[in-house]
């Protein structure tokens, strides 16, 4: 068994902190080096950051793909180097005549399965180096467009602010909301940037259960994977799972694509199984044994 704390912390990341800053702080607060996060947030962004502790760090790869929801404000008429309010202004446009109806129509073209070019100021690695490191050196490199899914791109007008749109975006992992804002400005015949980005949820984990960095609350490893259908096994099968045995689908009674969190009679997470070769199931992660 693990000697230190285990679980998932739902943190409300404050502005001005990098995601790594949060991890570093939690290592001190919780007294363990085994801390990692799923889904990077920019320093200026706030909101839900999921942090794995102890054995739960091994579960983060199953959490990262969950859908995200963000809110933010899109400033029409101003482009910046970083596509958000942290960058320098590169160009301005006269866009005072743009209506929220026109913006919503343009947003439809940025909804669904789309290709998105990652911004230079991002944590994505190209040639072994993070893009934001290259950008700070004044280097711009070719970035390959990547497929992402925007499930919802809702826009509302802001009273008294004709060049400001309130946005809520529900999207797949890997989507850059800054890029969506900039692309919306381009689609409207001008430019735009994003400000006040806040992530309100990752899967079923929302701001309502998020805690400050210095007051983390750890959810159990089983609760960390609550967005997946868990399979409860009896004591005999639990022993096999604990030894990392390859199983048949009939053993777990599954016919979907997984992954499948496997819990014992006491509800504790034993392992996470994934499709293997020959139609059998293999343990992706084993937490006991």
Image (cartoon, grey):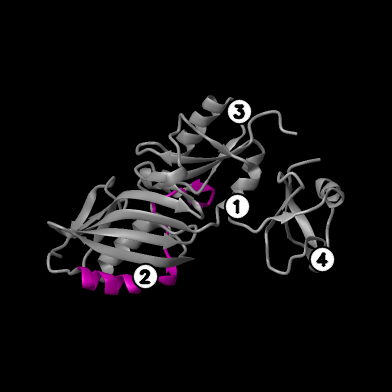
Mark 4, Cα crowd under 10 Å, few <14 / some 14-19 / many 20+, is few
Decide if residue 19 is on the left or right side of residue 45.
right
**Which residue is label 2 attached to?**
110
Q: Say whether marks 1 and 2 touch (CB < 8 Å).
A: no
The segment highlighted magenta reads: 100-129
Q: Say whether marks 1 and 4 touch (CB < 8 Å).
A: no
- Residue furthest to the front in view is 266
Q: Is residue 203 above or below residue 27?
A: below
| Residue 113 x, y percent position in the rendering | 46, 71
Could you tell me which residue is drawn at 51 percent across and 55 percent down? 203
Return the disc, 3 or 2, that comes first in the chain's sequence: 3
**Which residue is label 3 attached to?**
32
Foreground disc of the pair 2, 4: 4
| Residue 237 x, y percent position in the rendering | 84, 52
**Which residue is label 1 attached to?**
226
Q: Quadrant of the C terminus?
A: top right
Element under label 1?
Answer: loop
* Distance between the alpha carbons at the discs numbered 1 and 4: 22 Å
């Amino acid at each position: 068994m693990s000697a230190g704390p285990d679980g998932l912390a739902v943190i409300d990341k404050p502005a001005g902190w990098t995601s790594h800053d949060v991890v570093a702080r939690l290592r001190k607060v919780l007294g363990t080096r085994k801390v990692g996060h799923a889904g990077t947030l920019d320093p200026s962004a706030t909101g839900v950051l999921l942090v794995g502790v102890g054995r739960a760090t091994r579960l983060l790869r199953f959490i990262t793909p969950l859908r995200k929801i963000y809110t933010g404000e899109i400033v029409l008429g101003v482009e910046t180097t970083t596509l958000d309010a942290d960058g320098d202004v590169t160009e301005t446009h006269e866009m005072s005549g743009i209506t929220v109806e026109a913006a919503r129509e343009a947003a439809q073209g940025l909804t669904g399965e789309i290709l998105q070019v990652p911004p230079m100021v991002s944590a994505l690695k190209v040639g072994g180096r993070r893009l934001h490191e290259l950008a700070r050196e004044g280097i711009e490199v070719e970035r390959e467009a990547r497929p992402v899914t925007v499930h919802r791109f809702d826009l509302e007008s802001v009273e008294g602010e004709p060049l400001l749109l309130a946005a809520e975006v529900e999207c797949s992992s890997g989507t850059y909301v800054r890029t969506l804002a900039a692309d919306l400005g381009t689609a409207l015949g001008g430019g735009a940037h994003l400000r006040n980005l806040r992530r309100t949820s990752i899967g079923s984990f929302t701001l309502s259960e998020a805690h400050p960095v210095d007051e983390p609350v750890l959810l159990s490893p089983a609760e960390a994977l609550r967005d997946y259908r868990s399979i409860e096994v009896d004591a005999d099968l639990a022993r096999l799972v604990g030894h990392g045995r390859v199983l048949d689908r009939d053993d777990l009674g599954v016919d979907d694509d997984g992954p499948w969190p496997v819990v014992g009679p006491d509800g504790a997470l034993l392992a996470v199984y994934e499709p293997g070769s020959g139609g059998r199931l293999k343990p992706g992660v084993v937490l006991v044994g």
